[in-house]
Image (cartoon, grey):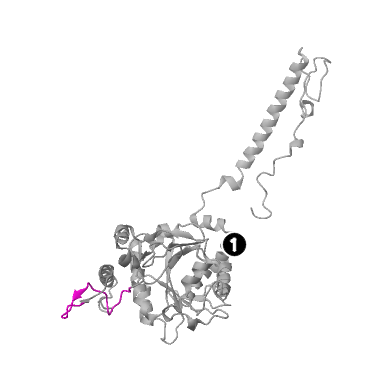
Amino acid sequence: MARGTRHPYSDFQPADAYPTSIESIPGYEYIDSAKGSKHNDGPMVPAVDMSASEVEMQKESTLLEDVQEKASSVLSSVLSSAPYASATPASEAEESSKSDSENDQDSEDAAVGEEDEDSSRGGSKSVSEHEGSSSSGNSELVDTKRARKAISSSVFTANYAHMALMLGYSLKKHNDLEALGAELVLLVLEDDEGKNGITRENRTRLEKAGWKLRVAEELEFPGVNQTQIRKHHRHNLNKLHLFSWTEYDKIVFMDADTVCKGSVQELLEMPGDFAAANDVWFDIPVDTRFNSGVMVFRPNKKTFEDMIEKVSDPHYHKPNDADQAFLQVYWKYRFYTLPFKFNFNLIMFEHWTSTWKLLWDEAVIVHFTVRKPRTSNHCHKPVEDQDGHLKGCREWEPLEWYAEYWKEMLKDLNFEDELPLLG
């Protein structure tokens, strides 16, 4: 309740404020049969012969009726007051905000001045169709209908641009984003003269596929030499940027090498601050640690700042580790487990084939971990060459499925003359 607001129960009086005897009720009169005298200032009534016990019972009955009438009057006043008369069910976004008041304040701060909150470590800004507009305008200009949830991914090198294109297309195909109150947001690094970042041409294509691009600076961590991290994972700690996007109540993150084949509504409704699916290895069908390729979380400024600090702590992050190993330690014992269908790991196809086939129909997000879809050197069904050697790859079935999906995307987005078929 806001300060200064009158509490709906303020009309209630303490117990000692109610009449404690029949005589103390204003305007009440009764006849003492023993004395035949009138009490209080009401009109005289005829005396009636009653025993002492009957007189006492009448006193108690009248007192009870008066107290009930007074309580009923106060209750009617309370129920007709504004907080109750206009009550309506809270929306999902309001429920989330009420359960985490700190996060609600973070969301409000971010809506008014998003760029300020990241200034100390390198913020991010949108380069979508509203490019050039500032997010730090006054509160009167805030769009109350804006999406409160984000389905996000990241592209830090040009090698993943085509996969992010496919992911965006597949998400829009299977999900009504407006009905979900969500938008597609792709994290990319600032232009570095073409050394790592995606080209302007690819940015245009990604936006056509439905992505709202958000440019960020490379995160820096005191005491951490990022050149020691494996080259293909070197930029992945920049995923932590997403935990600072407090204008969203919830974020679903998917690696660019994933593809959607169903509804993600269940992910957007997951409880808790962080959720991810168990990892899979060639010798471990269900790891106790999670895979960071698909994550659901509530962004929070304090959590983001704490993560940045913890990356520099050797108890949380080893010199050559990327995002996954760090996140596994940071959220250990505190994460919710997602079903495998939301991170259907390709390694399962090769080493746990029966499980893969059993779960394929219900899979929603397929994750191409050990073999990437490529426009060149694509995976094909193994065939014998002239020397009798098999040429191809073991994961050819899921990759051929992806290639057909890719062909559909090229046609629907009119990219057939711009981009090659896979393989």
The quarter of the picture where residue 206 lies is bottom left
Magenta part, dominant SS = loop
Count of numbered marks: 1
Say which element carries label 1: helix
Q: 1 or 372, which lies in front? A: 372
- Residue 395 vertical position relative to residue 97 in the rendered view, above or below: below
Q: Quadrant of the C terminus?
A: bottom left
Residue 251 locus on image (x, y percent): 47, 65
Q: Which residue is mark 1?
A: 102
Where are the magenta residues, as a range? 371-389
Residue found at the very far left of the displayed protein: 386
On screen, residue 56 versus residue 259, left or right, reads right
Depth check: give the residue in front, 54 or 146.
Answer: 54
**Residues packed near mark 1 inside 10 Å, few (<14), some (14 to 19) or many (20 plus):** few
The x and y percentages for residue 278 are: 42, 62
Q: Quadrant of residue 119?
A: bottom right
Give how far across and how far down residue 219 sits, in percent: 52, 78
- Is 271 inside the magenta-drawn segment? no
Pick the front one: 149 or 108: 149
Q: Position of residue 78 (x, y in %)?
A: 63, 42
Q: Is residue 86 above or below residue 410?
A: above
Seen from the viewer's position, the closer of residues 198 and 65 is 198
345 shown above or below 422: above
- Residue extending furthest toward the top: 49
Q: Residue at x 68, y 33 (%)?
A: 70
| Residue type indicated by callout 1 | Glu
